[in-house]
Image (cartoon, helix red, strand yellow):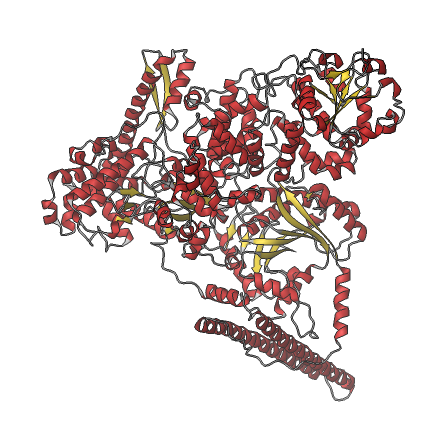
Amino acid sequence: MKMDQQDFTYINDQHGIELSILIPYEDSIEELAHILIIKHNLPLYIEKELTEHIFEFIEARSSEYFEELSKSIVNKAKDHEIDFEEVTKEWEKVMREEMVEFGEKRCASDEELFATAYHKLVHSPALETMLQLEHMYSKSVRQKAEEKNILIKKLSNRQSEEMNKAVDRLEQDMTETKINELVASHYETHSLLQGKLTSELDTMKEAQRREYREWIMQMVEQNQANSSLPTPNSPLSPAPLKDFPSNESNTSRDQINQSILEESFTIHLGSQLKQMHNIRILSANVMDLCAIEDNELLSEPTPQLLQTALGLYSNDLTGLVLMTDNKIGSRLTQDFQEICQRTTEFHFPHIEEQLDKISDVALQYFKKPLLESSRNAHSELLQPGDFYLTRHSNLAQVHVIFHMVTDDSLRGSDINSRHPVVLGLRHILKTACSNDVTSLTIPLLLQYDMTEEMTINWCEKRAELVFKCVKGFMIEMASWGGSELKNLQFMLPEGISNGVFTSMTEMLPRIFKVCNPKILK
Amino acid sequence: MTIEMTLPLLKDPQMQFGAITFFAKQHQGDTCGSNGLPLTPNSIIIVGRAQILKTIKNPYLCNYLDIIRGKHERTIVVSQYCGTPLINFIEKRPFSVDEIKRIAYQTLEGLKVLHQRKMIHRTLSNENILLQANGDVKLFNYGLFHMSDMGSLVSFPVLQVLYTAPEVYLNGLSSSYSDPKMDIWSLGICLAELALNKVLWSSLKLGQKIRKVTTLLQVDTSIFEKIAREHNCYEQYLELPEDLKDLIEECLNIYPNKRPACDKLIENPCFADFKVKPTKTISKICEPFQIFTIHELYHLWQLAGGDVFQELKKQGLIRSSPPVLSVPSLVLIEGTILGQERNPSTLYDPRIVQMPLDSLYQRFAHIPFPVFYPLIHCKSEIIAKFDPPPYDATGLPLIIKERDPEYQLHRVILLRRLLHGYPFTKDLIFEEANKDIPPFLRGEIWATLLNIKANYDIEYLRIDKFTHTTTDRQIEVDIPRCHQYNELLSSTEGHKKLKRILKAWVCQNSHYVYWQGLDSLTAPFLFLNFNDEAKAFACLSAFVPKFLHNFFLKDNSAVIEEYLCKFSQLIAFHDPHLANHLYEINFYPQLFAIPWFLTLFSHVFPLYKILHLWDKLLLCDSSFPIHIGLSVLTQLRDRLLTSGFNECILLFSDLPEVDIEKCVMLSMATFKITPKSITSRLHENEMFHKKTELDITGIGLEELKKERCSRISVNDVVRLVRSDFEGVVLVDIRNHTVFSRCSVVGSINIPFSSVSFSENVIENVGAQASTIKSKGDKVLVVIGDEETDLERFPEFLLQCNISKVCVLHGGFNTLLPITPTILTSTISI
């Protein structure tokens, strides 16, 4: 928005100058005088006189201009042509929205209080107890879930046995109606048990969540009262551990580690001032970043959780891009949702709740008639390139998930930088940048699963596109004034051939400038 | 005895500062500017616009000190903050009529300065007028409306509810109405509050307050009287003297054009007593010298560990709720962000946080008073004895010295004094700059090192920087790509200034053309003199002829080619091994070094490195850049030696990180030990390089290109032989007979014809091989005459990796006329 200006014509008869000047005039008057002297080939000694003359002209016109402007509005007001109420309301609204002194006096929300408490505690010696506690909670949830599965399995077994028997006796004292009744009653018992167990599990989670949050707040209060940290007491007595041979667990870990192909780079961007970033290419199952190793055998929580817990309320969040389709919470995310539900979510709403809320937000927005033409006006579905975010505290290595909407066009080999998913990637980086997500994992091929069209050629082409686009976005990001992306992970599908992997790691230094190694002498 | 004495200077009650913070408006969605580049973030525009505020110096205005940009568009403004806001006294103690008049007068003086600069206060109120202990007032926060481009760069309205003129409300939110008369109304309200000693409408709610102000337009009688009646102060109103009543009444006119302007109001006879009479005859040439300024205090406070950001955080003005709690829920492909609530901590909070200075006072408590008054010209030993011992920082790395508050205190005090004495203290400044240049004064010191004349601003004023020329397009393309990581240079204001300077340069240098790279060359000067375009231009204008003479000719190939040849020769002179390698793989300087020299490295290094590099460059001559080039290669030597052509090209396509301090040291070292004539060129600026017949002249480019070893002038040889005989080996390649007839003292004879060039083995030169091999760092001068081949032999030595080989320019015969002679004869006659 630039100031409104009005054109006035400056005439200097003595020197034959005619010039249109915009009022209010912002530039230097002396310079204007000199430009005129050069242009009209005038002697230099008139500079003072000319400057003064122009200065007077501009002063006079400026007050004229402002007079015009203000007189009309004041007169209008005097004649009641302006609705004072309207004006007042407009100003009041903005002030209430934008200025602290007039805004609602607002206390910190429960969420914020808990966040502060947790953040404080997690950076204290209580950390170990907290993680232990969380671990124990998760174990009991797992146990419960397992029990649930066993009970249901038992019931199913018994029922099928009963059914078999019934069918066998069909010729004797059973009629079809009776069998149908039996089926119905079986079904009923089954769903009753299922429902009962699920609700038990939910109740358990809810209880855990409440207990845990209360405990945290209590700890912090104690901490404040004593001004030193008390020895943390876990509200739970240690659960009896089943004895398992521990070497077994180690081997399973090793196996997982072996299957991961990875290589890290330090790169720099920028031509003069060089900004460093870490980049890693790895091939693994993307769910490994989410799922906490399901290992009942371990009494200790896995070390990644420590990192994740420490960073949860910090300004260095970790994000992951998952691919999904145009329905919020669609079947594609089923696996992921299941992983979320394996343990109790102590901080954020449960995954279904979050997804429901997102659906509401989307629905509300799409209902509004004022939609840009680019969007399919009648569709209430998301489009490729849109993405929604969920927050998690009970995943292994991530806090924020970006669910990117995609479609089948991604399988083709001819997508370019204007493809909606690539644009979506740019928005993801921007969102990451303005919300302090400083570590991010992106599917290098824009897909996490191996599919049949993934030939070496296809992979190379796709990877080149993603590398180049992401590089461009990162350069752009530098001027957005948010937090910079420190770690960027490019993920390849699990089980990709060594050949493809190597060709990716060879491609990266050709596109990004890799830092020179420092050689100590 | 000294401890109590220093602090009063620092502890001046007016040397206090505070900070306010706010958020700039975020750009909505994904928009591009008209040039197709992404929009400049508003916070950067604000930083650029606010710079000019730092130059406002007036006793009735608080000095602006710094504008800092945080993450996510946060902007922090640091400015002088001292005294107590008037609002704190109202209803607590009465103000006398004289006091009110004095406040009115000084406020008007402050406003006058702003209005002359086409700035509007807009937030003038009794909260922003600070009463000092001596009864003077200072206006605070007067720059917010200007830096936010009339409020358009921030999302909150820039005003003080009660003090805002009614027409401002009527014009609506989005209007950029900027009549200076609105400040006069605010002043009227301020004075009314003081005169009635009442906080106006203090019990009303926000909406009611705004309505109150706007409905004043309906009043047909005196507004001041109405206000007094509303507050049950009519009697007080009646008791006020007429002149004050009239003054307030004049200010509170509902028609802005009927309110008198600042300069009219100041003429009001009731102010006659407060006018500061010009007591002393103030020098017209230079401004009065200030022993210590608040800008220095702030600089030192920062060096001593002061951190505005931390202070704001500590005192609760920057509250950050964890980002994970406020991530959006949905982002659409068009860039629409949904489900993200407005973070309440981004609202505008007008609180001011005073910065604590205690730790700085403690840090400087031991500094004796005389430090502030350094003796510069005094030679007396007796007086010198009483001088405090100099603060010893020698041997510390430059980076450390630049961050040592105490050392910088000494340097700034000394150099600011010297600068005040410029041009008479030119030599002293040069001497001090040789030690190091304090960053705080770098812009001014550079200007003196470049011999800028005092009338530089008038010269700049007279240049037409407005009229369209053919280079405008190129300039406009280059500017948004020039050192944009820097906030000042990427701001709108920075772009405007850079464009004007470049246009001025093009206009002033019609014999030159605008080469890409000139923008990078200008960047450091603009960065250092952001508020003084004219000085930046003057520096550039002095810099180019001194270091880049004729580099910007339309056809500059001859100049550049010669320069690059000299670069190759210098590499050969100091590092034959590397030179041979680069020669073998055909990796010529033409392939990588042109942007280095054309922009004097300002295109390849970030600003902070350029500053350190140029600190030294300005003390040397136009051959110094060649030495810098050599030092860059030396740092990459190991990699270059193991790389082929392709790897080298790749390596230089994006220059790897270079340790700049090492680079400066290396280049200074080679610059000092290299005889001047080794790097002398035909295209040097004669103004800076006077030549005689004993120097090298008249070597054409063709000839130069053939020579891999540099020539050395007679002057240098004579100097070496006379003063540094241990440092030179003279090899005479004329045949034995001529040699024995007459030769330079101490020279050795290797007749050209006796050497076999079939293999690059130094043993081929015969008996003298060991002398040459063990010569170490000595300069090896090859002396021949017309009959000997003066290219083959030195090249042979070079190929044998012998360093510091050079050829006497003009041959043996040029030595004959030298007196006193350095020649001798082995044949006794």
Pinpoint residue A387: horizontal percent, then vertical percent: 59, 53
A395 vs B798, left or right, is left
- Say how many tags the image has: 0
Pinpoint residue A344: horizontal percent, then vertical percent: 58, 71
Above or below, A480 against A442 in this view is above
Pinpoint residue B531: horizontal percent, then vertical percent: 43, 32
Above or below, B239 against B108 in this view is below
Residue B169 in view here: yes
**Quadrant including the C terminus of chain B:** top right
Quadrant of the rendered image containing residue B766: top right
Quadrant of the rendered image containing residue B724: top right
Pinpoint residue B348: horizontal percent, then vertical percent: 39, 50
Closer to the camera in the image, B58 or A208 = B58
Point out the residue furthest to the bottom here: A173
A72 vs A40, left or right, is left
A373 vs A148, left or right, is left
B802 vs A91, left or right, is right
Point out the residue furthest to the front here: B829
* Residue drawn at (76%, 85%) of the image: A165
Residue B560 in view here: no
Closer to the camera in the image, B738 or B810 = B738
Quadrant of the rendered image containing residue B649: top right
